[in-house]
Image (tube, rainbow, N blue to C red):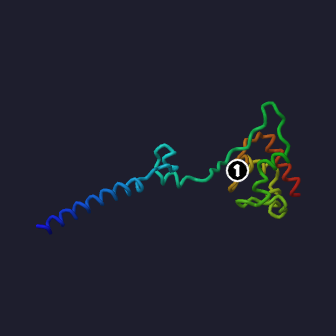
Amino acid sequence: MAEQHSSKSIMWAVIGIAIVLIAIVYPLTVKQSTSAADAAGGNDEADVRIQPVAKFELAKAAAPAAGGAPRDGAAIYNAVCGACHNTGAAGAPKIDDKGAWAPRVAQGKDALIKSLTNGKGAMPAKGGADLSDVEIKNAVEYVMSKVK
C-alpha cells in the first residue's frame, strides 16, 4: 500500500510541477505583437514585408503657362528630348552623332516634325510631353542646327 501512496503522490507532484512550468513558460511564448503588419491595420505580415521600397511614375512634362510664349528649341530639348537623345537610350540617335542624323535630316524638316508629332520607334508622340505645334517646330529646328 505504501507503494501506491508513494506513486500517487509522485503523480500529483509531477502534475503540479507541469502546471507551474506551463504558467511560467506560456506568458513568455505568447506573441506580444507590435509588428509592422499590426500597425498597418490588420494586413497580413507578408503583404507588409513585400511592399516596394519606392515607386516610380513617368509623367508628361508640364505645359507652358496659359498665355505664355512657347518655349524655345533648346529649352524643349533639355526638358523633354535630352533624356534619350543625350544618352542614346532606347535606340534614340545621339545629338552629337551626325552620321545617325544624316538620313533623318535628309528627309527634311517636315518629316522630322511628323516623326516628333506622331512618335517613332520607342519615342512616344510629342516626346511624351504636352507640346504645341510651335514648340515641336522649335525643337526640330534646334536639333537640326546641332546635327548639321
Which picture quadrant has residue 85? bottom right
Helix, strand or loop at label 1? It is: loop
Residue depicted at 77% across the width and 60% down the height: 87
Locate the N terminus and report the quarter of the image it occupies: bottom left
Q: Is 52 drawn above or below residue 138 in the view shown?
A: below
Which of the two residues, 43 or 52, is positioned nearer the viewer here? 43
Residue receiving disc 1: 119
Q: Mark 1: which amino acid?
A: Gly
Residue depicted at 30% across the width and 60% down the height: 17
Q: Provide residue 127's location: percent of width, then percent of height.
A: 73, 49
Q: Provide residue 65's location: percent of width, then percent of height.
A: 78, 34
Which of the two residues, 117 or 81, is positioned nearer the viewer here? 81
Q: Residue furthest top?
A: 67
Locate the C terminus and report the quarter of the image it occupies: bottom right
Determine crowd level at label 1: few under 14, some 14-19, many 20+ residues with C-alpha closer than 10 A.
some
Q: Residue furthest left?
A: 1
Q: Is 117 drawn above or below residue 18 in the view shown?
A: above
Residue depicted at 79% across the width and 44% down the height: 136
Q: Provide residue 120's location: percent of width, then percent of height.
A: 70, 54
Q: Is 118 drawn above or below residue 7 in the view shown?
A: above
Which picture quadrant has residue 5? bottom left
